[in-house]
Amino acid sequence: MLVLLLIATALQAYIIGSINGAIITSKYFYRKDIRKFGSGNPGLTNFYRVFGKGGAIVVVLIDVVKTAAPVVIGGFLFSRFLNTACFIDVGFFQLSLFGSELAGFFVMLGHCYPLYYQFKGGKGVMAMGTILFFVDWRIALVGWGVFILITLLTRYVSLGAIIGVTAYPVTQALMGLGGSWELSLAILSAALLIFRHRENIKRLIKGEESKFSFKRKKEA
């Protein structure tokens, strides 16, 4: 039962997570491919810079739903179908937390390396931001708070995301939520987002990273 649940949770999260809001919106609303504009990254920041806020709202809605659905499914599968006797001192909440975080990690994998787009996807910022609310609202507030503060102070979205995501495993550990497996999933998810920003980190060090502006960089 445990192996089947692990496989089912991971697969459904990866498959649904591979849906990309920026690519779908750019193709079906603007008849253009976001991957051919701006930085080429099929993520929210590049989409906003190229197409503006109207389409960006649609991107957010798609990415939030495609993230929330598999995370909820993962938490339900583990809390509903896995007998707690399989673990020692594990209750309903921790089973649900593990299922949600497992699904969250594979949603991130799907977003970053999507099945439908030659495994070339976004960097997972919106996906991660959504996942945090299903882990714990307090972790989400800390993570989003750090992200917004750093981004406003520096105007580097990448830096805000890199620093903000560290709140996930750190705050979870400080709050004592879950055990070593849950914390490991939090660390893996945060590490994946940071890894996806490795080129941004190089540009930040060189002082070449683009700063975010509410003004569109150019017309698409």
Image (tube, rainbow, N blue to C red):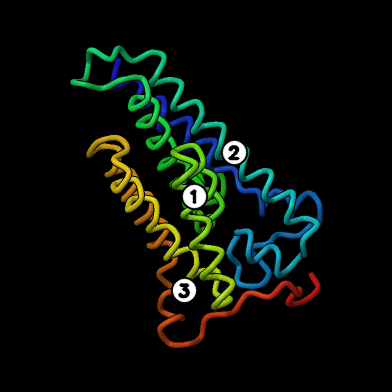
Residue shown at the point (55%, 40%) measured from the top left: 67
Q: In the structure shown, which secondary structural element does the residue marked by tag 3 occupy?
A: helix
The residues tagged by marks 2 and 3 sit, at their Cα atoms, a distance apart of 25 Å
The type of residue carrying mark 1 is: Met
Dot in front, 1 or 3: 1
Q: Is residue 42 left or right of residue 83?
A: right
Q: Nearer the viewer, residue 8 or 65?
A: 65
Q: Which mark is residue 128?
A: 1
Residue at the left extreme, as displayed? 88
- Residue 53 position (above or below residue 202): above
Q: Position of residue 83 (x, y in %)?
A: 30, 12
Furthest toward the bottom, the residue is 207
Q: Does the CB distance between marks 2 and 1 fall below 8 Å?
A: no
Q: CA distance from mark 2 to mark 1?
A: 12 Å
Q: Residue 52's spot in the image, x, y percent? A: 77, 64
Q: Secondary structure at mark 2?
A: helix
x and y percentages locating residue 55 in the rendered image: 77, 55
| Number of numbered labels in the structure image | 3
Residue annotated with mark 2: 66
The residue pinned by badge 3 equals 200
Looking at the image, which residue is at 44% across and 73% down?
199
Q: Pick the quarter of the image with the N terminus.
A: top left
User: Label 2 crowding class (10 Å Cα cut-off): few <14, some 14-19, many 20+?
Assistant: many
Residue 135 rendering spot, x and y as whole percentages? 44, 38
Three-letter code for the amino acid on which mark 2 is drawn: Lys
Which badge, 2 or 1, is on the more N-terminal residue?
2
Q: Amino acid at mark 3?
A: Asn
Q: Earlier in the sequence, mark 1 or mark 3?
A: 1
